[in-house]
Image (spheres, rainbow, N blue to C red):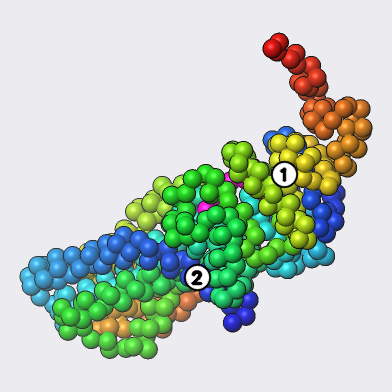
């Protein structure tokens, strides 16, 4: 089965880019191809000039992935999770220790440092996954639905953090089902559907392209569900 | 240390750390099991059996038990570790790192090898305290133990990569590995078996491994040592090549 077809996408250094699409559209497959978790049968992916297949070492070194699933190792403590990840990326011990301390504080996990990951709450696991992705100081951070299932407080906390690291120069590729999240945070947005990029631009440009008022309506037009538009919902009488 | 050395050391450290965190299960239980084998087959039955090929029965059995603990622990560690990480998705953290397929494979291999070595080493120490265990041919014993540990570590990796559920690993261990080990002559000499079982034993690869280790300890073997070493080296190299190919292609590891 062909999961991606003729996808052509370019993310500029320092950009905050959103990839939107329905479930099964190919978002995660695209991310997995860029990070080595899937092997494309054809085509090429270049990350800061490094071929993601031929020169995978340098390409992966530049990428940090916070996946959609809470894929933490149950045997490890919070601190070990960060330390081992940095070790996989060749970071020396002293630097690992300092970076671990810094990220534990940033993500309010210091008190949980010695606890095993399986004892953490869902929100804490999500924080840890983001900290882990940041551990080796990637130039491109890929966030695959980072706010799925998290409470409002943590979602906003993550938004602030994402914006801050983007301003510090980290490029970010974000996939999300929350359109307001993409609209609020991202410079550019692409729609992916059925393995193809079907639209790309700012939210205003995408709305104009589909001849609708906003990004959400453009998305609904993409998936052929215009009848669900909020403009067609009757407001309850007060 | 270079970045590649740090990477490999970390991958390997994770594997060792995993079994050290549950050492009652990964080290304690196999040690107790081996101690019970020595007690039952050595102390209880050994006095009735007397000796085999001029060797005290308990001394005849112990090299096989050491080989058994090395092989089963190397195998179990790697098959469980890989399957658990696949199950949790945690293996993605390693697969999306700059580590090469060779680094990943060797780290898993030597993780299991280390557990096998610790359990078999402790078995040797305990056995040496209980009986007078000779080491007649150390130059055969050391490479034999290394090859046996390496082979079963690789086999564990292979089964762990191929497995889709815990049942797959249990099946390989319970219905394939354990019978082959028990029927390979850990507790007896194949020369005592009637036909056709004596001939059939020669088709069991583990029979040759047990004989290599036994020869290293007590200087007795029923098979050709150079030929067995050569065959074991070839088998270990072959399974390593298969695993490296699986890791390179990402078989059941990458989508």
Q: Is residue A221 above or below residue A63?
A: above
Q: Residue at x 85, y 38 (%)?
A: A203
Residue B132 visible? The answer is yes
Direction left: furthest residue: B48
Residue at 66%, 43% in the rendered image: A156
List the residue tagged with mark 2: B12
In the image, A5: left or right of B36?
Answer: right
At 76% from the left and 56% from the top, the residue drawn is: A166
Q: Are the residues under marks 1 and 2 on the same chain?
A: no
- Total of numbered circles in the picture? 2
| Observer-nearest of B231 and B42 | B42
- What x and y, as percent, mark residue B200? 33, 63
Task: Please tell me in which quadrant of the rendered image residue B72 appears.
Answer: bottom left
In the image, is B178 to the left or to the right of B45?
right
Let me know if residue B224 is in the magenta part. no
Predominant secondary structure, magenta span: loop
Magenta residues span A68-72
Measured along the vertical axis of the image, is residue A227 above or below residue A157? above
Q: Which residue is mark 1?
A: A175
Asked whether B245 or B79 is in front, the reply is B79
Does residue A70 belong to the magenta stretch? yes
């Amino acid at each position: 089965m062909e999961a991606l077809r003729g996808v052509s996408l370019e993310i500029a250094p320092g950009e905050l880019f959103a990839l939107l699409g329905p479930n099964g559209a190919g978002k995660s497959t695209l991310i997995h191809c860029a990070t080595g978790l899937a092997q494309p049968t054809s085509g090429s992916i270049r990350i800061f000039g490094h071929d993601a297949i031929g020169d995978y070492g340098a390409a992966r070194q530049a990428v940090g992935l916070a996946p959609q699933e809470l894929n933490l190792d149950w045997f490890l403590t919070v601190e070990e999770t960060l330390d081992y990840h940095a070790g996989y990326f060749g970071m020396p011990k002293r630097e690992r220790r300092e970076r671990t301390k810094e990220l534990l504080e940033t993500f309010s996990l210091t008190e949980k440092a010695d606890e095993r990951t399986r004892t953490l709450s869902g929100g804490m696991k999500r924080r840890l996954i983001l900290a882990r992705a940041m551990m080796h100081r990637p130039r491109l951070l890929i966030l695959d639905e980072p706010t799925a299932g998290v409470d409002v407080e943590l979602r906003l906390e993550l938004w602030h953090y994402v914006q801050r690291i983007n301003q510090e120069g980290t490029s970010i590729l974000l996939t999300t089902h929350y359109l307001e999240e993409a609209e609020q945070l991202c410079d550019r947005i692409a729609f992916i559907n059925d393995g193809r990029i079907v639209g790309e631009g700012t939210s205003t440009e995408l709305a104009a392209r589909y001849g609708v008022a906003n990004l959400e309506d453009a998305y609904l037009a993409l998936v052929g569900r215009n009848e669900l538009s909020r403009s067609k919902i009757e407001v309850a009488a007060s | 240390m270079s970045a590649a050395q740090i990477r490999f050391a970390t991958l390997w450290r994770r594997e060792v750390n995993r079994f050290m965190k549950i050492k009652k299960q990964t080290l304690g239980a196999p040690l107790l099991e081996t101690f019970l084998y020595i007690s039952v087959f050595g102390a209880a039955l050994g006095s009735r059996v007397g000796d085999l090929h001029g060797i005290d029965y308990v001394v005849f059995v112990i090299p096989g038990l050491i080989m058994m603990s090395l092989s089963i622990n190397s195998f179990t560690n790697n098959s469980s570790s890989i399957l658990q990480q696949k199950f949790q998705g945690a293996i993605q953290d390693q697969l999306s790192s700059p580590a090469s397929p060779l680094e990943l494979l060797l780290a898993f291999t030597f993780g299991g090898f280390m557990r096998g070595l610790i359990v078999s080493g402790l078995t040797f120490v305990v056995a040496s305290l209980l009986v007078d265990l000779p080491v007649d041919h150390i130059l055969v014993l050391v490479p034999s133990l290394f090859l046996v540990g390496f082979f079963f570590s690789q086999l564990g990796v292979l089964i762990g990569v191929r497995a889709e559920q815990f049942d797959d690993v249990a099946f390989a261990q319970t219905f394939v590995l354990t019978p082959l080990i028990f029927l390979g002559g850990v507790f007896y000499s194949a020369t005592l078996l009637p036909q056709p079982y004596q001939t059939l034993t020669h088709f069991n690869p583990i029979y040759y491994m047990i004989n290599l280790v036994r020869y290293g300890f007590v200087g007795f073997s029923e098979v050709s040592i150079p030929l067995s070493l050569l065959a074991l080296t070839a088998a270990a190299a072959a399974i390593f090549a298969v695993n490296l190919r699986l890791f390179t292609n990402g078989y059941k590891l990458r989508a």
